[in-house]
């Protein structure tokens, strides 16, 4: 079984037991997070696609790590003008481990993340 979900402006294909990195989410290592922006779910035979979301599906994850990615260099240059700027950037991320892809009411007391559609 796998699901496609949306968080941080990106879409991720997730399966139970997999670890994936998303844009930074609030929370401490070890906490549970409930992601409700599920776009598609497949169990191998049947595929359900939302328009745009599946209302009754959710993905329960546990925060494995809060960190920063490797540094990238941002270099700006204008020829013949003597203009050069070099900056570095390290993006914050949250590593999540998928524990369960569920349907219907949530039985645990996992916290919900703010939905992008509510903002």
Image (spheres, rainbow, N blue to C red):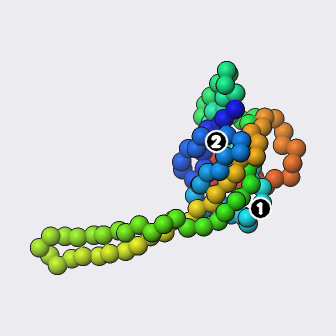
- Residue at x 27%, y 70% (from the top left corner): 76
- Residue at x 58%, y 62% (from the top left corner): 93
| Residue linked to disc 1 | 30
Q: Secondary structure at mark 1?
A: loop
Left or right, 61 with reference to 109: left
- Residue at x 71%, y 45% (from the top left corner): 17
The local crowd at label 1, few if under 14, some if 14 to 19, many if 20 or more residues have their Cα within 10 Å, is: few
Query: Which numbered disc, 2 or 1, marks the residue that appears first in the sequence?
Result: 2
Where is residue 33, by image quadrant? bottom right
- Label 2 – label 1 distance at C-alpha: 19 Å
| Residue linked to disc 2 | 14
Q: Give the residue furthest to the front.
A: 17
Residue 2 in view (yes/no): yes
- Residue at x 30%, y 69% (from the top left corner): 75
Indicate the position of residue 62 as horizontal and vertical percent values: 74, 54
Indicate the position of residue 40 as horizontal and vertical percent values: 63, 33
Q: Secondary structure at mark 2?
A: strand
Indicate the position of residue 73 as horizontal and vertical percent values: 37, 69
């Amino acid at each position: 079984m796998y699901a496609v979900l949306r968080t941080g402006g990106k879409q991720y294909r997730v399966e139970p037991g997999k670890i994936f990195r998303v844009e930074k989410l609030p929370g401490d290592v070890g906490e549970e997070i409930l992601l409700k922006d599920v776009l598609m779910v497949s169990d191998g035979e049947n595929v359900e696609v939302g328009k745009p979301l599946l209302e009754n599906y959710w993905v329960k994850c546990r925060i494995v790590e809060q960190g920063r990615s490797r540094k990238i260099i941002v270099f700006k240059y204008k020829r013949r003008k003597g203009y050069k700027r070099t900056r570095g950037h390290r993006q914050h991320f949250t590593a999540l481990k998928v524990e369960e892809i569920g349907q219907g009411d949530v039985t645990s007391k996992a916290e919900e993340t703010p939905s992008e559609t509510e903002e």
